[in-house]
Amino acid sequence: MPEGHSVHRIARQFAQNFVGHRIAASSPQGRFAEGAGRIDGHVMTDAKAVGKQMFLEFDNDLWLRIHLGMYGAWDFAGDISVDPTIASANGRMGQTNQRGTVYDSAGENSLHSIGAPRRTRLRMAESEKLEPEITEFPPEPIGQVRVRLLSDTAVADLRGPTACEVLDPAEVDAVIAKLGPDPLLENDQAIEDRFVETVRKKPSPIGLLLMDQSVVSGIGNVYRAELLFRARLNPHTPGKKVPEETARALWRDWAKLLTVGVETGQMLTMDDLDEDALRKAMASRDDRHWVYKREGLPCRVCGTNILLEMMGSRKLYWCPVDQA
């Protein structure tokens, strides 16, 4: 499932290439014909992400709400340019302070698309993949496209979302009110205090609380495992027994990793990498994380085998020594 950094990057793609344009909305598969009709022919005026959910505003005071869920993805085509955050990063890899283009052999890294808009395809979901240039515009829909948003220069096709609905402003506010804080939207002391207070009054394990979107927005399975390891925190620790300073450190680290994810397009969770290590990390997930997907392999710190268990119906990876 796409985590918070991916959805923020998708929202930035819409802000770059669709906001300010009149949009032709349709539902090629037919399942969203009524909803598409409500926004068809209107100008997109805003695009924003809150955690794993995205909201697109139109000039008739309606919003399109999207939750990609496990299987959803956006395919962009046309004169697509990389989002403003990436462009301004100029190839800098977040907290590593390294510069230069880094290529992902698995096709998950969008950094090689930095530059002027080009007539191409870009798939954005949990990972990103830049595909060959297109020969005609707009291209024919491929597969079961729930909704197509077409401007004069770009098209976005949505497939397989968990949620796709048109809402009025009050309904949007109601959805957002149920979500926990997102550090890319608000990150002052009061927001940090809200997160800490919420965590420290709950008996549920911290490994579940970090995945609860009403507690904090945007964290999924990868970031959960990595945040807990970086904090050297046992995932089974009840929220109410997490020390206050540890809870504050979790919030600040989430803000840091989320920013890195938006800048790089990757869930890069290892710090202070030299140039060679950075290139390996960007080219392969095997070199990108401390514990995620490393079950049975030695911990990078203590050498103990990383454990895998189920928590909240999701796979949890952790070190029984460093996170004891």
Image (spheres, helix red, strand yellow):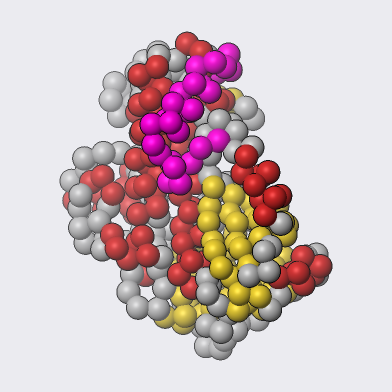
Can residue 146 be seen from the camera position used here?
A: yes
Percent x, y of residue 232? 36, 21
The C terminus: image quadrant = top left
The quadrant holding residue 29 is bottom right
Seen in the picture, residue 117 relative to 14 is either above or below; the reply is below
Q: Nearer the viewer, residue 116 or 131?
A: 116
Q: Is residue 219 left or right of residue 82?
A: right
Residue at the farthest top position: 241
Q: Which segment did they paint magenta? A: 180-205
In this view, the residue in front, 288 or 48, is 48
Q: Position of residue 48 (x, y in %)?
A: 53, 56
**Position in image of residue 77 (x %, y %):** 53, 76
Using the image, determine if residue 116 lies above or below residue 127. below
- Residue 128 visible here: no
Spot occupied by residue 279 in the image (x, y as percentages of width and height): 26, 53
Please check the rendered image and state whether residue 61 is part of the magenta-colored stretch, yes or no.
no
Q: Is residue 143 above or below residue 265?
A: below
- Magenta-colored stretch includes residue 193: yes
Which residue is drawn at the image coordinates 53% and 45% (left, top)? 51
**Residue drawn where x is 42% and y is 80% of the image:** 118
**Number of numbered discs overlaid on the protein picture:** 0
Residue located 46% across and 62% down the image:
12
Image position of 181 (left or right of 228): right
Q: Pick whichever, 99 or 298, lies toward us.
A: 99
Residue at (30% x, 39% y) in the render:
270
Q: Quadrant of residue 155?
A: bottom right
Q: Is residue 147 left or right of residue 88?
A: right
